[in-house]
Structures are given as C-alpha cells and as structure tokens.
Image (tube, rainbow, N blue to C red):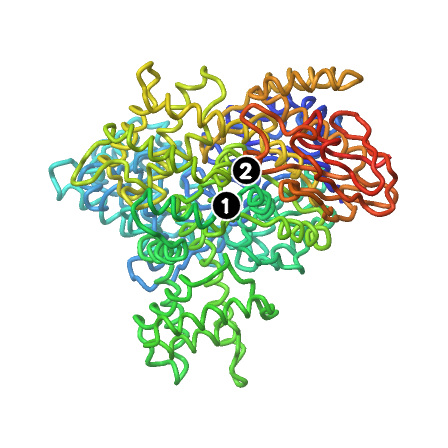
Amino acid sequence: MQIPLATYRIQFTPSFGFDAAKAIAAYLEQLGVSHLYASPILTSRTGSTHGYDAVNPREIDPELGGAEKFDQLVEQLQNLNINWVQDIVPNHMAFSSQNEMLMDVLENGADSIYRDFFDIDWNHHYPENNCKVLAPFLGKFCGDCLESGELQIQYEKSGLTINYYENKFPIRIESYSQVLTYDLGRLQEKLGRDNPAFVKLLGVLYTLKYIPSGEEGREREDQISFIKRMLWELWNGSEEVKQYIEENVSTFNGEVGKPESFDLLENLLTEQFFRLAYWKVGNEELNYRRFFTVNDLISLRVEDENVFETTHELILQLVEEGKFNGLRIDHIDGLYDPAQYLNRLREKAPEVYLIVEKILEPQEELPITWPIQGTSGYDFLNQLNGIFCDESNEEQFDEIYYRFIGKAVSCEELIDQNKRLIISRHLAGDIDNLAHLFKKISAGYRYASDFTMYGLKSALVEILALFPVYRTYINSGGASSADREYIEQVMTQAKKNIPNFLNELDFIEKFLLLEYDDNLPEENREEWLRFLMRLQQFTGPLMAKGVEDTVLYVYNRLVSLNEVGSHPGSFGVSLEDFHTYNSNTTANWPHTMNTTSTHDTKRGEDVRTRINVLSEIPEEWEQNLKQWRDINASHKDYVSGRDIPTYNDEYLFYQTLIGAFPFSKDEYPEFVERIKEYIIKAIREAKVHTAWIKNDSDYEDGFTNFAERVLKDSEDNQFLKAFRPFQEKIQHYGILSSLSQALLKLTAPGLPDIYQGTELWDLSLVDPDNRRPVDFDKRQKYLEEIKSKTGSDLLDYIPQLLETPEDGRIKLFLIYKTLQARGEYLDLFQRGTYEKLSVVGSLKSHIVGFSRELGEQKIIVIAPRFFTSLVEKGEYPFGEQVWQETRIVPPADSTNTWQDVFTGKQVDGEDALWVRDILQDFPVALLVNK
C-alpha cells in the first residue's frame, strides 16, 4: 500500500480538465505533493461543476478529456512520482435523461435489466406510485403543466419521449401503439395498403403487439431495438410516414386553451413506468431513496453484488492498472451496510489506500473494524480549528451574541427544532415509507397488531430527532457496544418526551437492538433487519440537513466554529483534548487524512482563523458591533413590519466580512458580488426568513441591498471607515494563526491534504465560492522564487516574506519547507510516536508543542496561538520581549542541538529550549534533532 506523503485536492470541471491538471503537475511535484486527490471523474451530467452527479460509472468523463487525456495525465504524474487518490460515489447517481441505466428502468419497468440497481420501492403503499418511479421534477401540478403545454411528446432516433423542458422521459415501448395507430386510416388512405412504407409500419405495429417480457429479457431488448431501428428508417425514408408521426405527436401534445385536447397525452402518461409530479410531492410521497433531500440524485443499491460489480468495474480496473492508488468513499453513511461495502471493496483492492467521508460527533469513534486508513479529515479539522478559539471567553461571547440579537438562544434547542423541521418538510415521505414498512411488519405480532400508523410514525419521528450521531452500524453481525449505548440513550429520552407511546417505543427498541423472540422464524428476522438497516440510512441525511445545512446558518455566536462535522454549541477545544486526539490517531488511524479546507467546508481555512481571533477580544468585538449597527441602521429596508436584515443575520454578515475581506483593493468589486451571493445561500439554508423551497424575495432583496449600501466603495462610507481599521487588525492576527494552523496540519499524526489553491491565503466561502478558478501561474511563480531563495540567504529572504504577508508567499514558504521535511523524514511522520511537550512559563497556554519520534530521529513542532495579547497589530511574536521565560522541555534522550527547518538556525538546549531563542525570525518552528 502506498501511504501518501501529502495529497493535493483538485476539483475537476469542464473548464479545468485533465489537460489543465497536466499543466500544474510539475508544480505539484516541486511543492512536495505525493498524490493528486481528484474529485469524481466518471461521466457526470453535462456541465457538472462537481462530479457527484454521475450518469455513467463505466466511462471517464469526456468533458474532462476522456480516457485518452486521463491516461496522458496519469503518465505525466507517474513520471514525476505523483500517484492518484480518487473520490468515488457509490451511493447515488443523477436522476437524469443522460443516465442510460435509469432511463432503461423508466422505459421498461420490471423488465429492465437495471430494475434492481436503484433504491426504488416498486410496491409502494400509495397506489399511484405502484410499479412506477415517482419523477418529482415539475414546477407546478402535473395537470397544470399538461394543459399549459409544458409536457410534450418528442420523437427522435432513440424513440419517443415525454419532455419537460430539458428533462426527457422515455415512453414504454408498448405505448408506442397509441401514437402510431391514432387515425391510422388517414395514412392508409394517403399511401394505399400495399405501399412498402405502410406495410413496413404495419410490421412494426404487429411486432409491438407481441413484445416479450419477464424471463425473456434479452429477446425483449432485441425486439425493442428492432422496432426503434425500423421506425427510424421509416422516418428518414418516407416523407409521408414522417409527416404522419409528426401530426400524431402534435395531436397528442394538445392545444393550449382546449383542455380536452390533452386527454390523449394524459392517458398515455398513466401507462408509463414513471409518474411525473410537482417537485414538492417528492418530499411527501417519494418511492425512491435520494441523496439527502435532492430529488435529482437517486440512490443505488450498491449492497447488491451485481450493482457493486457494474458500478465499480472501471474503478477497480484503474486500481488494478496502478492508475488509482487510493480511494475516498463519498457519503459512506448512506450505504445500506457500510461494513459489507468496505470489506467487499478491500477484498477487490487489497493494496489500495482507503479513506471514507465520515462525520464524527464529539466523543464518537470510527468503527475500528473497518478495513480503511481513516477519514477524509473533518474530525481533525474541528479539533485543530477549536484550539484557536479562546475557551475562557465562552460565557462572555454568549452574552454579546444574546445582547446583539435581543434574545438568548440554545444551540441544542435549535438542533432539535430544525431536525423536526426537516422531518416535517423535507423527509416526510421517507419517514412515511419507514412507518408503513414498520406497520406491515408489526401487524404480524399479537402484541403489536393494534399499533396505529399515527403511533408508529410519532415514535419514529421522536427517535430520529433525538439521534445524537449520523448513524449506527448494526447489521446481521449484531450491534457494537457504542451503537447499543446510542440507542439506549435515544430510547430513554424518547420515553420521557412522549410517554403516551411507550408501547410503540418498547417495540421499536427491540427492533433497533435486534432482540429477536426465541421462536421468531428466519423470514421475520430478515424483515426486522431490513427495517433497521433502512432506518439507519436516514439518520445521516436528517443530521446533515438539520444541523450542517440549517443550524450552522442560524446559530451565529462564532461562525468559525460552524463547520462540517462540528458541534456549534462547543466553544473551542482544549490543548489537552487536542493532544489526546492526536495520540489516539497515532495509535488507531496513523494514516488518516488531515484537512483544513474541502469542497464542502462552510468557510475557507484562513477565513476561520480570522474569525477565531474575535474569541480573544470580546469587549473590542462588542464595541465595534454596536458602532457598526448604529452606522448601518439607516441602510436597512423596513418591509411588512420587520427590519431587513434581522439582527441575527446582521451578526453573521459582520463576521463574514471580517473573515473574507480581500487583501487587495483590486478584488473588492468581485468581493461585494460574492458576499451578495453568499447571503442568498446562507439565509436560504437557515430557513428562517426565506428558503430554497419558497423564496421570500422581499427579504432576500432587502438583505442584498443592505450589503450593497454598506459596502459601497465611496469616500463618505462611514461604515467602511469604522470597519477597516478593526478588520486590518484581525487580518494580521489571522495571518499568524493561519501559519500555526498550517504547520500543525502538516506535522500532526495522519497525512495532510491541501485543497486546491490554499497554499496561498484561502478567503473563500461556502460552495460554489470555494470552487472558483485558481491562479496557478501565480503560485508557480512564487514557488520558483521560494526555491531559489531557500539556500544560504534564508535569513535575508524571510524578512521579505514577513514584510508583505498579504501576498501569501509566507504561507507557501511554510508549506513548501514542511513538505520537504516530511519527504526527508517520511518514516518518522508516518510511523513515529506523538508526545505533547511540557511547556513552562507564564505564556505556556500560547504554545502548541509536540514531538514526533522514530528511533534516533526526533522533531519538535512549535506553533503559537492567541496573539492579540502578545503583540501589537503589524508586529510578529519574536524574541525575549514577547516570550520572556517561556520554555519547552525537550524529549528525553535527545541531543542538545536542534536545527529549525524554516530559518536554518541552530538552537541549543539541554534541559530546556527557550521559545525566545527559537522564535526570533519566523512565527513558527519545526526543529530537527541533530
């Protein structure tokens, strides 16, 4: 297995494909990266900017360059000794007319060879969904779309489809007769019965009457292909037949203003294997599993071995060929049986480096039995981010937040409220499906036969709302002690919350813990297990939508803490907890991935470090807040009895400005537009004043207008005059924190991942802002300069970097030098021990220090924090006047001489290493024992 030294995440898009990656390959090699870490590259929907909406898992995306360009990129990377970690998506595909496997299902229903590929309930409890796939993509009620002419039959080479704008739904072959025989006498009269074209059409119609089904799948497929080929030949070979089909299609498409003219199309729709519906129906009557609440991402049944083999054939081939050396599994919690999936994948690819995208709640541990190397790094991100938040000011920050918004709020209550909101508005259909399944099972038990749908659903809602983690992993092998504890915790609270449903809760608890009756037949045991496995697939989406995509935009106390995988109610992480976390990583997951930015993070890594600075200076933060609120009060709109924005949204707005404000004035106009786009996303995700489902244009326009007014680039802008001095101060301290953050990520147990472009300052916001194009030319230029200067004149070059930190070269310098050290001492970083260092002195809480050791090799990492009380704005934390008597006890059995990787200077110390001697020229230190 190739364990990466460091990965570099690339977001491939149609405008940044394989050729573009080739152009930066040499840069990545010079930077010190060992593995390109790629977003999904299998064929996705046309124009996809992320790749998580695959339509063909057996093809490399032509929009990125296809197989040929991919092979050229792999060859170039391998020539540079760079390998490849690939992000794969086993949970879902796009619900799209480009998805040929799904279209085959919609066209052939139970006769499709892909019938069991997608997670569809063909025997749904709603009769209108029975033997059909709900297609909730209409912008209004189906009848309205029909009579407004928005649903249109179209004929082309692939056959007849019913189209709704760009969406195309294939008509089942048996329904062709309706269109092709409508007023057939008209064509006979025109051509005559013996006309070759007419005879050929009759042959097609005859064949349509005897289309095989069921076990004769291959024969059916051949006949359908034959019929479509004959029709296309008639279309192109006979003008009269073409005109006849066109006229019939036009007749079926109806005439707006004549409702009765749509009867033919309505009847045709009822015959199909899909049910076109208003998109809101998807939240309540869905009969397929989605990715989260996204209607146009349909889930796969990857637990089926045939589905696994088909969707992973190309992936595993590329692993076998050595083109993929690592895999990152997207949304592992969405799978029916994650352990089964991972074991199957590991069996097929025993040497591949394997990580999973997994959100771990506080105190939750990754299942130790999974055959993987670790997670994609959100757990590390939140531990690292937390140590730059001053825990001691939590109570004061609470009060500042409450005073500004005019009320006290509980994060826990917000989580509970919003999970229930998501259940009622977005997952109602999913919960309904679970309840019906449970009702069906419970009817077979004498002590549960009287349970009502209302009672069962109430109990399920309570359990799901209370779930403290993304999911449990109980399967046929039973439950772990941790999973049992979670379930017992949930059930205890549920019984307190809804005591009227104790019987239902007791019954469900038996199911969740698989406490089978002794005499329960095997068939019933399988039903129990199936219900439990289905339920486990929905706790994750609920947690993600309720917390990650809602509460993190509502609870704005300190938004740098509102990150993927975080618990926003926690205010920082203690140094002791950070060291404990790293020690556990060394013991259990030494090759896990460590990240600070991803395509999914809510804020760029350097945005967070800026906002974290506020935790150090609560009084100054509140003073500025009051001043800004007073200055900007006149810029608010007053609509329908409310000021826009509300104080809570205004509080978020100011933190966002502090975190993302650009270094360069040239970027300011674009920044204002980015802020306006971010505002819309943030307030829709919050679901308080507006939402994706139902936009409140008054509130959205009012807020963006407010932003435009207060950010107007003019001489008389009082807000910017008041804001900029404070922002520039935060910006300076944020730079210092970012350097410490970068060093810790690059040296902590695990392997570091660098998200594209973040080797310079990353001031991006949530996607799609964090997927903007990266200026690699600038980065290449800077790196060439850094490499040319890192010889004997280091101490002359570092002051230049410190003089203009805003250009980001200082961060790139740190990353480059640390990656070179990782390469030189790779075994130490991958297999070495981790020990927190004893820091002595009055400023010991300001130092994050640890050592990594392997045999005789030893390194020390020193990263300061909480700079506002150490230095003034514009100053660096150097020398005795800052660090005074603060010192570090070196590891036992080390020699007295250490060399700093960044400055090249030697530091001596037998019983103590004095921070004042170490931090004289550079803000952080990486010491190698000599």
Q: Nearer the viewer, residue 279 or 782?
A: 782
Q: CA distance from mark 1 to mark 2?
A: 10 Å
Give the answer, above or below, for where 665 lies relative to 676. above
What is the total number of numbered labels drawn onto the structure image? 2
User: Percent from the top left, x then y, of residue 725?
Assistant: 44, 24
**Amino acid at pointer 1:** Val
Residue depicted at x 62% and y 39%: 86
Q: Is residue 487 left or right of residue 262?
A: right
Dividing the image into 4 quarters, which one contains the C terminus?
top right
In the displayed structure, 733 sits above or below 775; it is: below
Q: Residues within 10 Å of mark 1 (few under 14, many from 20)?
A: many
Type of amino acid under label 2 = Thr
> Which mark is drawn over residue 564?
1
| Residue 53 visible in the snapshot | no
The residue that appears at 27% across and 27% down in the rendered structure is: 705
- Which residue is more in the foreground, 377 or 444? 377
Q: Callout 1: helix, strand or loop? A: loop
Which of disc 2 and disc 1 is earlier in sequence?
Answer: 1
Kindly check if marks 1 and 2 are in contact, taking CB atoms under 8 A apart as contact: yes
Q: Which residue is mark 2?
A: 598
Whether residue 623 is visible here, answered yes or no, is yes
x and y, in percent, of residue 577 in the image: 62, 52
Which residue is painted at 53% across and 48% down in the image?
391
Q: Quadrant of the N terminus?
A: top right
Q: Could you say where residue 81 lies in the image, as x and y percent from the top left? A: 76, 30
